[in-house]
Amino acid sequence: MNAQPIAGTCEACGFALLVERKKGGKTVHQCADKPCSAIQDESAAESESED
């Protein structure tokens, strides 16, 4: 199953795209850059979408 791309910036590496994944029954935002793949705080994508 492919992850849904969402607007946002990675807090760890600054990559300009996040993906939405389901982990442990909840939805998380993760960096789309495979070497990084950092899980984001919930506010990362939300702050991008509010602008």
Image (tube, grey):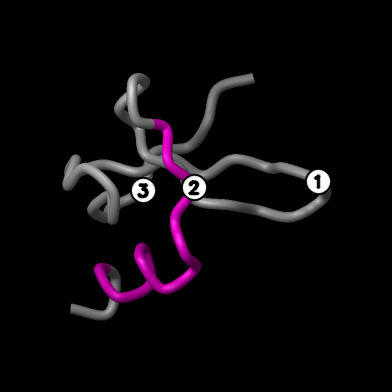
Q: Secondary structure at mark 3?
A: strand
Q: Is residue 5 left or right of residue 24?
A: left
The amino acid pointed to by label 3 is: Ile
The residue at 64%/19% (across/down) is 1
Quick one: label 1, few (<14), some, or many (20+) residues within 10 Å?
few
| Residue position for label 2 | 39
Sooner in the amino-acid sequence: mark 2 or mark 1:
1
Residue 43 picture location, percent across and down? 41, 73
Range shown magenta: 37-48
Corner quadrant of residue 51 = bottom left
Separation of disc 2 and disc 3 at Cα? Answer: 13 Å
For label 1, the residue is 24
- The residue positioned 51% from the left and 44% from the top of the image is 20
Determine whether the residue tagged by mark 1 lies in a helix, strand or loop: loop
Q: Position of residue 10 (x, y in %)?
A: 28, 49
Looking at the image, which residue is at 55% across and 22% down? Answer: 2
Could you say whether the residue bearing mark 2 is in a helix, strand or loop? loop
